[in-house]
Image: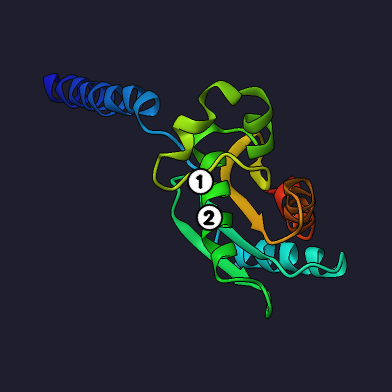
Amino acid sequence: MKRPVTVLAAAVLAAVILAAPTARAEGEILKVRIMSSDLAAKIAQGAVHACREKGYQASAVVLDRAGNMIAAQRDTLASRHTLEIAERKAGLVVMSGADSGDIRKNRGDIRSDLNHMRGVIVMEGGVQIRVAGSLVGAVGVSGAPGGDIDADCARGGIDTVRDILDFAD
């Protein structure tokens, strides 16, 4: 008769031991949303197409939330330098969590300092890519005659996949 009590006590003890680390780990392990390279390519292509429709040859670069390039698209006649500029615009977005135009407008006091950092440039044309409020990456566009147009093209690229971003869980 003592054996069932011992088995029950062991089962309860095992359940407590197994449950305790799981409860603690939930606060230590974070869920991260990651954009696929296919989705990033659609955004880049959509951004280049949006600029082309406005009559401009541009490049678009998509970075993931860690700043790694996952897609790049250069229109046929866009300068090769537009790729680097687009990447650096997106880099500022990933670093700051804000659109590059907002940083340019609101943080002129540190603009020259930021422009000396590798991988970022304070120019309009970098836009956040968010899913359910979480930053999953950024798209930077360069090549139009003005950062405001680059930013519009970047938003146009995001709009091509808006239904996917809005309904992702």
- Single out the residue that lies furthest toward the bottom: 76
Q: Is residue 55 above or below residue 19?
A: below
Residue 45: percent from the left, percent from the top? 69, 69
Residue 46, picture quadrant: bottom right
Q: Residue at x 78, y 45 (%)?
A: 148
Circle 1 SS class: helix
Q: Secondary structure at mark 2?
A: helix
Which residue occupies 56% across, 55% down?
A: 85
Amino acid on which the number 2 mark rests in the picture: Glu
Residue 110 in the image, given as x and y percentages of width and height: 51, 25
Circles 2, 1 touching at the beta carbon (< 8 Å):
yes
Q: Is residue 40 left or right of residue 21?
A: right
120 left or right, relative to 16 = right
Q: Give the crowd class for mark 2: few <14, some 14-19, many >=20 residues within 10 Å.
A: many
Q: Quadrant of residue 123?
A: top right
Q: Residue at x 18, y 25 (%)?
A: 10
Please tell me whether residue 42 is drawn above or below residue 105 in the rendered image. Answer: below
Dot label at residue 36: none
Q: Residue at x 21, y 21 (%)?
A: 13
| Left or right for 63, reference 29 | right
Taking the image as shown, residue 57 lies to the left or right of residue 62, namely right
Where does residue 60 sit, x and y in percent of width and height? 63, 62
Residue most toward the right? Answer: 54
Which label number is shown at residue 91?
1
Instruction: List the residue tagged with mark 2.
Output: 87
Residue 169 appearing in the image: no
